[in-house]
Amino acid sequence: MSSSSSSYSFVGLRNLVMVAGHLVYTSGNYGNIDEKDSCGGDTRKDVGPRSEAQSYWAVVDSKHWFRKKEDMRWRALTEEHAKDSSENLLFSISRFKELAGIYPYNITVVSYDFKEERFAQLHRSAIGFPETRFFYSGTPTSSTSKESTLKGEALVRTQFQEDPYGCLGSLRRKKLGCDPFHHSIPYPNGCPEIEELLHHCGVDPYSGHLPWSRRI
């Protein structure tokens, strides 16, 4: 590392477990969580400046799912700026470097099972992360909406196949509409080694050097 390890708050961490958010919990009562209390992601102006990441952390903490494992609670951190699944992955890596001083050696993504191909193949390959160090843990979706959900996911996968970095056409327009509060993206501050990747746009894969292309 180019900076002293004492300047990082989470030195010693090597593995990233990323939980992809899907909803913002809007109720102030975390004791009785119900679907009606949830709405779309922090992309919606009507829920106020609440992020999916903050919602998930607050629900987990209120339910005592961390239990007595305080070592787990202090390692459960949030990334507040991603506007789509591609940024979920890349910005989580950026946040990890910002806090730990190194890039993650292994990455595990936790999300719906139907999104595995999108994350494990499309997004992972777009950033050149080694397949042998990338893992996916899928959770099932509701059976009542499975058909429409799979149809929608197939469309999104096709869009990312044509636009791997989500910076062109419909994906770009969707992303622009997902920032009603006009947040500034802090990266590449804290992760200068991947500045070019963060700014890369186009249908061709990024061909520059990546810090995870060598053993970390």
Image (spheres, rainbow, N blue to C red):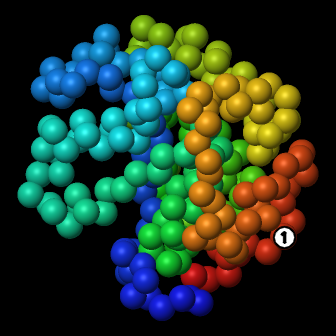
User: What is the residue that sits farthest to the left in this orientation?
Assistant: 68
| Picture residue at 26% right of the left edge, 21% below the top | 27
Under mark 1, the amino acid is Gly
Determine crowd level at label 1: few under 14, some 14-19, many 20+ residues with C-alpha closer than 10 A: few
Q: Quadrant of the C terminus?
A: bottom right
Residue 150 spot, x, y in % from top left = 59, 19
Q: Quadrant of the N terminus?
A: bottom right
Q: Which residue is mark 1?
A: 208
115 vs 58, left or right, is: right
When the figure is inspected, residue 133 is found, relative to residue 64, above or below; the finding is: below
Q: Which image quadrant for residue 56?
A: top left
Number of marks drawn: 1
Residue 202 spot, x, y in % from top left = 89, 47
| Picture residue at 68% right of the left edge, 81% below the top | 214
Residue 175 spot, x, y in % from top left = 69, 32
156 vs 4, left or right, is: right
Q: Is residue 106 visible?
A: yes
When the figure is inspected, residue 143 is found, relative to residue 25, above or below; the finding is: above
Which residue is more in the foreground, 185 or 145?
185
Residue 208 spot, x, y in % from top left = 84, 70
| Picture residue at 67% right of the left edge, 25% below the top | 177
Which residue is more in the foreground, 149 or 7?
7
Q: Which image quadrant for residue 65?
A: top left
When the figure is inspected, residue 76 is found, relative to residue 50, above or below; the finding is: below
| Picture residue at 55% right of the left edge, 27% below the top | 43
Helix, strand, or loop for circle 1?
Answer: loop
Q: Is residue 14 visible?
A: no
